[in-house]
Amino acid sequence: MSSTVAAILQQAIEGERLTFDQGVALLRSADLLSLGRAADAVCRRLHPEPYRTFNIDRNINYSNVCAAVCDFCAFYRKVGHSEAYVLDRDVLLKKVEETVALGGDQILMQGGLHPDLPFEWYEDLLRDIKNSFPQINIHGFSPPEIHFFHKLYRMPLKTVLERLKDAGLGSLPGGGGEILVDRVRKAMTRGKVLTDDWLNVHRVWHELGGRSTATMMFGHIETLEERVEHLERVRQLQDETGGLTAFISWTFQPEHTDMADIPPAGAFEYLRTQALSRLYLDNVPNIQSSWVTQGPKIGQLALYFGANDMGSLMIEENVVASAGTVYYLSLEEIRRAIRVAGYIPRQRNVFYECIDSSPECETIAMAAS
């Protein structure tokens, strides 16, 4: 490792902000273990607590109908396709009921860009869920969906978000981020939100007092510089609004997509990019492991590469599974993975507040006092 790279890593460990060029230099030149050690040091500085977190939720895809064309997506179907669906309300509410029965306090609800459903359908959906399960947080509708509503229904973006919030929307996921560089987005998608508008959905939501997460799907046609540009745009948004609770990254899963000729990025690429995200996003409090795409062992190892959260039990997942990647962990397996990594497992909500009791943490606190 060069003295320049070592100095950049030390700078990040000490809490000094990295520049764009420094981020690129780390991705190009830093060895994996040095990146991991630095990311772990930053994570421990930001999260000195003896625990690492997880949550229990369910990814409910209310529809797979989508007006956009994304070459990387194996999930969507066009209107009229024999496999296109919109979930019946009773089926959807049953999924929420099952989530609550397993101790979940949240659903992640996303669909495609459906061109035919009226806006009131979404408002009624939110109200039906909240009326039946008032304790459930609805983490719903990705920025591409919100922007699509804004265009399709000819309503101001603020009005769209206000009406959804009034109907029961609790927080906004960061789906559809892919790479926040228009060159990449235009090459892989047609009819889908571009970078500035994706960011602006979050911005307006934050102005309304909402919280959201940011994501990145990498390992396809982007350059290393464009990966860092994505991180830079996320960091700039967080400087402006402070509304992001977490950042989650994962590698592109090419199987069954129109980009199946691209070799899948492996664990090495995943861990070094996640480590860089922890070093670069100095203003985003939480980094989430992506065991759903990487598998349980790499998902656990991510806790040493900058992640302080093991992600979700993920009772149901359809989009990544459509691309042939299917990993499942039980609640006890998630807890065990955190324990083996040397931490106490704690259940949290979408705002990263612990919602369980932990005798182990209480014992540590008493000993410290």
Image (cartoon, grey):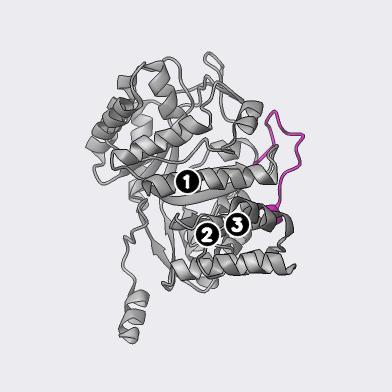
Provide the residue designation for mark 1: 236
The numbered mark, 3 or 1, whose residue comes first in the sequence reads: 1
Q: What residue is pinned by disc 2?
A: 17
Check disc 3: other Cα within 10 Å, few if <14, some if 14-19, many if 20+. many
Alpha carbons under labels 3 and 1: distance apart = 16 Å
Q: Which mark is residue 94?
A: none
Nearer to us: label 2 or label 3: 2
Amino acid at the residue labelled 2: Arg
Q: Secondary structure at mark 2?
A: loop
In the picture shown, does residue 295 fall above or below 66?
Answer: below
Q: For mark 1, give the secondary structure.
A: helix
Which residue does the image show at 57% across and 43% down from the upper left?
230
Q: CA distance from mark 2 to mark 1?
A: 12 Å
* Magenta stretch bounds: 252-269
User: Seen in the image, is 135 located left or right of residue 147?
Assistant: left
- From the top left corner, tell me how far across and down residue 235 is, in percent: 49, 49
Identify the amino acid type marked 1: Gln
Give the number of marks: 3
Look at mark 3 in the image and give the residue it sits on: 276
Q: Residues within 10 Å of mark 2 (few under 14, many from 20)?
A: some
- State which quadrant residue 98 falls in: top left
SS assignment for the magenta stretch, majority = loop
Quadrant of the rendered image containing residue 108: top left
Percent coordinates x, y for residue 334 in the rendering? 50, 61
Regarding mark 3 in the picture, which secondary structure is present there? helix
In-front residue for pair 89/201: 201
Residue at (73%, 59%) from the top-left corner? 29
In the image: residue 165, left or right of residue 272? left
Q: Earlier in the sequence, mark 2 or mark 3?
A: 2
For the residue pair 151 and 346, the one nearer the viewer reads as 151
Q: Is residue 63 above or below residue 46?
A: above
